[in-house]
Amino acid sequence: MTGTGHNSAPPADGRVHDATERNWVDAYCPSWSRPWLRLSRADRPAGTWLLLIPCWWAIGLAIVHQGWAWSDLWLFAGSAIGAFLMRGAGCTWNDHTDRHIDGEVARTRSRPLPSGQVTPLGALIWMCLQALLAFLILLTFNMTAILLGIASLALVAVYPFAKRFTWWPQVFLGLAFNWGALLLWTAKTGEVNFPSLCLYLSGIAWTLHYDTIYDHQDREDDALIGVRSTARLFGENTKQMLWIFSGLVLIFAALAVITAGGGWIGVLGAIGLFVHLAWQTSALDIDDPAQCLALFRSNRSAGLVLLAGIMCDTVM
């Protein structure tokens, strides 16, 4: 992997190697708070968007299915706050379990745990605090949604270990990261049914697409330390697999829109998402870590294309 040698030292100011330029944590937050916010990856907001967008897809589709209600405004706001908190809790847990591995990978060596900015015990306390706050938000939803939210903790707990026993850890990430599609549909409609399951499957395929690209940054380091990923599994065949994943995204997203009662604008949103993923696949250079990171981050825009189509359908 070009540009991430094993002798790379963590930045002297504590910044994380792949944090966004001029991010709000390093630019504006008090110095005492930065290690904790870095541990939650608040300085790298792409992941929060990727957790939140399937939630908003689901709320929008449920509105298409059932119509608007004032309580939907809280679903949008509550899921945004919850996504920020649960992404932070999940990343804290992931970094705690991976703290020894992260110290061996150039891109992750600067994270708060391997760099010594936060202790392992402090990380666990921070994780519990974030999860507790997210749980308080979950309690404002209906009982079925609450139970779904509790069930998601099993996926969150297992995911960090997946790369130790399977070449497909991205599947476990997809199962966890897109659970909000089921949860928020249920928070609106009271049940899990076919449109939400299609949306969930579309989100899982989307995660396989973007996280395979993301993991090509670490391909060589992962091989040296024995960590598995779809990036290593696919290797030079990555683009062919990405075409399959992007096709599945389109099929299941379109099915979700149609079976929820959506119209042609929602379907156009699904096509627009596919076009964005097709552009990523065509442009990808798996030997350019900086480009892999940039393409990964572009998935916020990709997901918002489908959301725009769905939300247009809510007023048609």
Image (cartoon, rainbow, N blue to C red):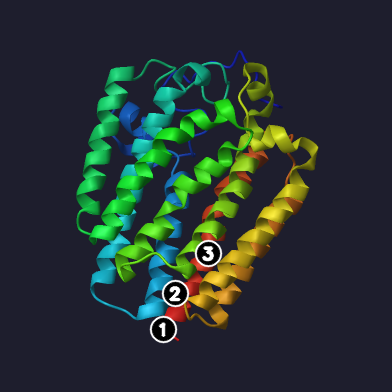
Instruction: Find the distance from the CA under tag 2 to the CA under tag 1.
Output: 7 Å
Q: Are marks 2 and 1 in contact (CB under 8 Å)?
A: yes
Mark 1 and mark 3 residues within 8 Å of each other at the beta carbon:
no
Counting other residues with Cα less than 10 Å from the Cα at mark 1, is it few (<14), some (14-19), or many (20 or more)? Answer: few
Mark 1 or mark 3: whose residue is earlier in sequence = 3
Closer-to-camera residue (77/141): 141
What amino acid type should be assigned to the residue bearing mark 3?
A: Cys
Q: Position of residue 67 (x, y in %)?
A: 34, 81
- Residue lying at the far right in this picture: please name it: 236
Residue 97 in the image, given as x and y percentages of width and height:
43, 24
**Residue 183, percent from left and from top:** 36, 58
Residue type at mark 2: give it: Met
- Residue appearing at x 48%, y 68% in the figure: 194
Can you see residue 298?
A: no
Q: Amino acid at mark 1?
A: Val
Mark 2 and mark 3: Cα distance apart in space: 18 Å
The residue identified by callout 3 is 198
Taking depth in this image into account, of 4 and 268 the one nearest to the observer is 268
Numbered mark located on residue 311 in the image: 2
Residue depicted at x 35% and y 49%: 83
SS category of the residue bearing label 2:
helix
Q: CA distance from mark 1 to mark 3?
A: 22 Å
